[in-house]
């Protein structure tokens, strides 16, 4: 095996990243060494690349250099002394939330929101590299029948699966607010799960076209019709259901803007469910608490990460069976050396891409 590898690293506390040659790490204790076959860009990577305010607060200058990336699929080449579950040759991806197993959340099997949570690439080295070190506890073994460029997308797909299926959606009307990759993937998941109606709302034509490919019954471009236009169209569609006198059964809030949070509260029916996944930029937002939540008896479910490993189990079966085809989200695949193009695609607005995948071996 080679002694050095190519890795895309954040070397300085400023925008950008650098391709570096660094030693291939050796797995110790509970670590496994993975040969990375495919790895995808996430919003978090984009923040780190752009070195925005959030990135600067999350990673201190003295933690650099750091290899970026946390979504991957690849083959296990070596394992540390204490590794027992994962074997050399396994085709793996990883849950990116690394739990402590000792806090009250972990002791209640809520590992994904561990009180001492560490996150791959934010608290460890990342996977935009030819090899990556991953703790065994978060490794997930994939079927080889799933191509690496699809398997690496399971981290964001897991957000979508958890968000959509935290409670059943079969036979329910679902409104998805947001046309980011998780909103689009949630569209696919809700359709496969047999939702009666799925409307996806976003601001980007290109992205809404992917939602249509995933089978959305309705896509609405908020940038074209405005907030009121969105509500009007959803209410029109709901006329099929109880003459439109009530709202939707389920809203997946995947934007985190004040307008979309209030849209969720307006459009959910009494006793309905809102999955709260979007993260607000503002620390505090205004909302109609009484009418939107209390009197409506709305069930709000905070969604962070993926349930370990329940969500992964669902994804594996949905992908392996061919019931869920997420290929439409994979719009760009390129060698890691072309990372600048990848990040340009992710930065352009409105976006002309779904998920962008890097191939570290060219
Ligand atoms: Zn991600
Ligand atoms: Zn914990």
Image (tube, helix red, strand yellow):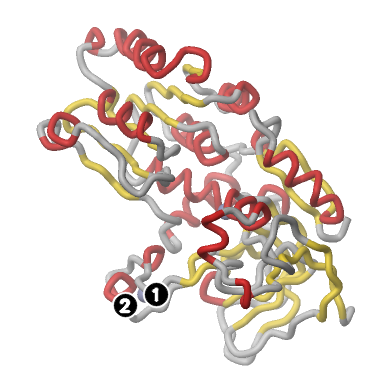
**Position of the C terminus by quadrant:** bottom right
Residue identified by numbered label 1: 116
State left or right for residue 265 relative to residue 259: left
- Mark 2 within 8 Å of ligand 2, using the beta carbon: yes
Disc 1 from disc 2: Cα separation: 7 Å
Residue 219 visible, this orientation: no
Farthest left residue?
A: 295
Residue 181 picture quarter: top right
Q: Is residue 140 above or below residue 321?
A: below
Q: Is residue 285 above or below residue 295?
A: below
Of marks 1 and 2, the one in the foreground: 1
State left or right for residue 245 relative to residue 119: left
Q: Is mark 2 on a helix, strand or loop?
A: loop
Tell whether label 2 touches label 1 (CB within 8 Å): yes
Residue identified by numbered label 2: 103
- Mark 1 within 8 Å of ligand 2, using the beta carbon: yes
In depth, the one of 54 and 244 nearer the eye is 54
Residue 298 picture quarter: top left
């Amino acid at each position: 095996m080679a002694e050095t590898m190519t890795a895309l690293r954040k070397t300085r506390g400023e925008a950008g990243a650098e391709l570096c040659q660094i030693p291939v790490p050796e797995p110790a204790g509970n670590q496994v060494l993975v040969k990375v076959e495919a790895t995808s860009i996430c919003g978090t990577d984009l923040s780190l690349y752009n070195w925005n305010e959030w990135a600067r607060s999350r990673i201190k200058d003295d933690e650099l250099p750091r290899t970026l990336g946390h979504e991957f699929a690849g083959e296990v080449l070596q394992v540390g002394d204490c590794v027992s579950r994962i074997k050399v040759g396994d085709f793996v991806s990883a849950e990116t939330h690394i739990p402590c197993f000792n806090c009250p959340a972990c002791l209640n099997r809520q590992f994904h929101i561990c009180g001492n949570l560490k996150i791959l690439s934010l608290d460890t080295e990342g996977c935009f590299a030819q090899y990556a070190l991953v703790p065994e506890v978060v490794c997930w073994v994939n079927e080889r029948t799933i191509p690496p460029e699809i398997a690496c997308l399971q981290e964001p797909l897991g957000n979508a699966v958890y968000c959509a299926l935290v409670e059943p959606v079969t036979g329910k009307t679902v409104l998805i607010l947001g046309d980011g990759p998780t909103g689009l993937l949630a569209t696919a998941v809700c359709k496969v799960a047999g939702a009666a109606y799925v409307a996806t709302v976003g601001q980007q034509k290109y992205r809404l076209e992917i939602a249509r490919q995933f089978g959305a019954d309705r896509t609405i471009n908020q940038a074209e019709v405005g907030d009121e236009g969105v509500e009007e169209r959803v209410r029109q569609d709901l006329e099929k259901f109880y003459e439109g006198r009530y709202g939707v059964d389920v809203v997946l809030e995947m934007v985190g803007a004040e307008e979309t949070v209030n849209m969720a509260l307006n459009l959910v029916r009494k006793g309905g469910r809102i999955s709260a996944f979007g993260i607000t930029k503002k620390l505090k937002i205004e909302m109609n608490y009484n009418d939107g939540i209390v009197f409506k008896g709305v069930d709000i479910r905070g969604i962070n990460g993926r349930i370990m490993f329940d969500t992964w189990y669902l994804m594996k079966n949905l992908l392996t069976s061919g019931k869920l085809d997420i290929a439409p989200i994979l719009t760009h695949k390129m060698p890691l050396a072309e990372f600048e193009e990848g990040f340009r695609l992710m930065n352009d607005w409105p976006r002309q891409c779904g998920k962008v995948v890097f191939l570290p071996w060219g």
